[in-house]
Image (cartoon, rainbow, N blue to C red):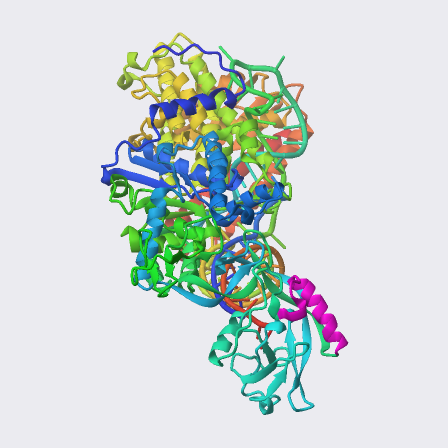
Amino acid sequence: MKTKDMEMSTVYNPKEVEENWYKYWLEKGYFQPKNNSDKKNHYSIVIPPPNVTGSLHIGHALNNTLQDILIRWKRMEGYNTLWLPGTDHAGIATQNVVERELAKNGKSKEDLGREKFVEKVWQWKTKYGDNIIEQLKKLGFSCDWSRLRFTFDEGLSKAVRKVFVRLYKEGLIYRENYVVNWCPRCQTAIADIEVESREENANLYYVEYHIKDSKDIITVATTRPETMLGDTAVAVNPNDKRYKKYIGKIAILPVVGRELPIVADDYVDVEFGTGAVKITPAHDINDFELGKRHKLEEINILNDNGTMNEKAGKYKNLKVLECRKKLLNELKEKKHLVKIEDYTHSVGHCYRCDTVIEPLLSRQWFVKIKKLAEPAIKIVEDEKIKFTPSRWTKVYYEWMRNIKDWCISRQLWWGHRIPVWYCQDCSEIIVEEEDPKVCTKCGSKNIIQDPDVLDTWFSSALWPFSTLGWPKKTDDLNCFYPTSALVTGFDIIFFWVARMIMMGLKFGGNIPFKDIVINPLVKDAEGKKMSKSKGNAIDPLTVVDKYGADTLRVTLASLTIQGDYICLSEERIKSFRNFTNKIWNASRFSINNLKDFDINKIEIEKLEMSLADKWIFSRLNRIIESSTEYLNENKFGDASKILYEFVWNEFCDWYIEFIKPRLYQDEDIKDKQTAQYVLWTTLESILRLLHPFMPFITEEIWQKLSSPHKVESIMIAPWPEYKGKYVDNKIEENMIELMNIIKAIRNIKADMNISYGKEIDLYINIADNNKLKLVEKNIYYFKTMIRTKSIIIGKDIEKPENSATGVLEDIEIFIPLKGVINIKEEIERLEKRLKKTKRELNVAYKKINNKDFLSKAPTDIINKEKTKVDELIGIKEKLENNLKNLR
RNA sequence: GGGCGGUUAAUUCAGUGGUAGAAUGCUUGCUCGACGCGCAAGAAGUCACUGGUUCGAAUCCAGUACCGCCCACCA
């Protein structure tokens, strides 16, 4: 076979190859599934759609690297694979971005009006929305770009519409006045899980309310004094002796002067504060529910933008905190404010913009979720869907079993408009899949659509089937649904994963995916969250630019352990850059030494493999088996770790070094060809094993490693097959024995300050026949592996004078060092070894002299321990003899 | 308040009952026909603590301490 004659640089340069190979793969159409009819043999993943406003961060890099590893691996295994990409319209986030753009020109969305504004957002999306998609390509991800989807696409919007209408008609979507989480900056309601609460230092204010027609006073405690402007009652515990007499009486709201009934309710905790609570039904969920029980008035004191409204009287138009300050002053002046305590409590913040959330009574749309949650819990209990790592199952159950109705309406303009029309004439509510022209009841044309849009996560919940064409019965849907795996972060298990399972079961008619792989969150070297503002963020594209996509990918994959977080640092990336380069150079070596090799011209059956050849085949097949198994278990870190160790520590450090003398000679052509054959086969398999992790460099080398490849790209080459016949324990044991002897000799050389390159005379005394044979057979390699001038080997070799000694079980090694050896140092070296041996011997003795151990431990353990004692005694005696001679 | 996870070498982590491991870092030495992004050798751990089970515990059980996260919140 011809090896393409190519100069390979000593340092791998990813920039020269990555773009071209990506183009090549795209041209060949490898990213697309073979067909969409072979349901049996399919493997599919839908991408967690990044926001159209997003730019690629390290979390995306990790998440998508894992997906690409799975897809590339399965593709090589012969599956009909589809990795479907797309983006999310990201309601609030995108609207915010475009609003900011407008603000630069001093405009607001109101200036444009709804229609023009939405048009503007679409324009923005067309221009920038696929930035992140282009960035994904830089990392080599093999998504089928021809199937790119967007949550606001026409097709996906139809799916959203259908789901809404069906849920509504089944009574699972309803509209209600309720205290919701209101973000005054985004000016929309948000769902409970979109609120992030944080402990904050605050004050607890004690305010006196006078009792009507009495000199008595009832004191309430509050953290949000401004809400008293919306108070409509004071509540006490019915069993509280202090306040029993006031129940049914009237309290006077300070400043405002409103009359408030004093009601009794079990909700009130006698122990907390004063035991009396001001009740603001429009701005506190508990107060709201208490208010319902006692039929209290609900007074909303806030505008949508978080300022006080006309109900706040003279405090109208002030921001909440300004109002609080001024109101407290007034209360103080009027002697109503009697005490201020330090107090820490948790305060809700908007997960999009971090603004403090105000609970606000408003009319919103909700999904009645319990009925949808039940089957979604059951399906996980039945293990039809599995979490990796499995502990996330508990987190899922915990949330699903305590789930609350989902507020899905958002007071935004960018998003799926709620498909509900209100007839202005007969008050009919019209909910249909097609836009109604007239009222379905009275025929009036005077109908108005609900102004709100749906929570972005509503459309994301349909992603696994809406992207495949649902509600149409498409071939894609039939072939690729349910999808095989979902890879995502644990931060969106509730937002997304749980809802996809519920919606998938309800509308997709099946689970949306079988395997949920929860990937860790990436933190910096100190374990801190990465963020642009902190300046500790590692930009994946910068890493790609500096070190290449393969390095980034294999780094991330290796760090993907079963924990919640991984710490990434430049130092770590560099270590994998070095690995990439190691692969490059091992390949460079191999290619150069395979120039005269043609696998078609050799008779494989007639080759006589050496110990090292058999050993590397044995190891290779073990690695094929276990790396495949690790991938099956979604253990990306373990898979990459064993590949790293195999390539570097076994293939490079030992195998290549072992065969060098065979490759460099031309006397024994058959032996040379054997080495070449094993070298070629092993490297070629390594490349295929590494391909899912490091697609670019493996393709580059695979193409250079000219060969009888049956296919034109490593991407579509078969996944290496495990061949058990090559796995041989005895061979591996022998090799380890040999390695240990070599290491022991190198150790002596290093200890005695003999440079590695200096050739030595070597005497080896081996008592055991098998070991003697083993060493004799492989003595050929010692010249290069340890640089020997002469070797004398046998059963009763006399120790030459003035030689350094090494003891290894029943083997003695002597290196004569006339004039070089320092007797004192040699004694010290041997004594140190003797001391250690004696210590180990003591421990072992104790064990085998323990009656309980002998009677209760299994025999193989006892025998092992006895053998160990014998060995240690042997070593000890040899060391002592040598020491005696030195003195 | 409820729940989950963690604590093993300087660092990041493997290790689920039988001699404490890897990678990186560190120390020392090295132009050996792949690679200094390298080679060789080496040092380095009371496996958080206290009990218990066991012939034997990093590993199983109970408790303690510390760290992290999630959920629910009493104004």
Above or below, A646 against A167 in this view is: above
Q: Which of A361 and A404 is in front in this view?
A: A361
Left of A805 or right of it: where is A81? left
Tell me: residue A602, above or below residue A881.
above
Quarter of the rendering containing residue A185: bottom right
Q: In this view, does A27 lie to the left or right of A51?
A: left
Q: Where is residue A878 in the image (x, y as percent from the top left)?
A: 54, 34
Question: Which quadrant is home to the N terminus of chain A?
Answer: top left
Classified by dominant secondary structure, the portion drawn in magenta counts as helix
Q: Residue furthest top?
A: A667
* Residue A321 within the segment the image draws in magenta: yes
Question: Residue B19, how many percent across, how many down?
Answer: 50, 46
Q: Which residue is drawn at 37% across and 65% down?
A: A427
Residue closest to the eye, B62 or A14? A14
> Residue A198 in the image: x percent, y percent?
60, 60
Say whether residue A871 is visible.
Answer: no
Which residue lies at the image location 38% right of the left edge and 45% below the top edge? Answer: A486
Q: Which residue appears at 33% of the width and 58% of the height?
A: A431
How many dots with numbers? 0
In this orientation, which residue lies closer to the viewer: A594 or A266? Answer: A266
Picture layout, residue A846 above or below residue B64: above
In percent of the image, x 45 and y 14: which residue is there?
A661
- State which quadrant residue A209 falls in: bottom right
Q: Is residue A640 above or below residue A288?
A: above
Task: Indicate yes or no whether the magenta region holds residue A67.
Answer: no
In the rendered image, the quadrant that contains the C terminus of chain A is top right
Residue A147 coordinates in the image, percent (x, y): 35, 35
Q: Nearer the viewer, residue A453 or A497?
A: A453
- Residue A128 visible to an observer of this rendering: yes
Q: Give the range drawn in magenta.
A: A312-334
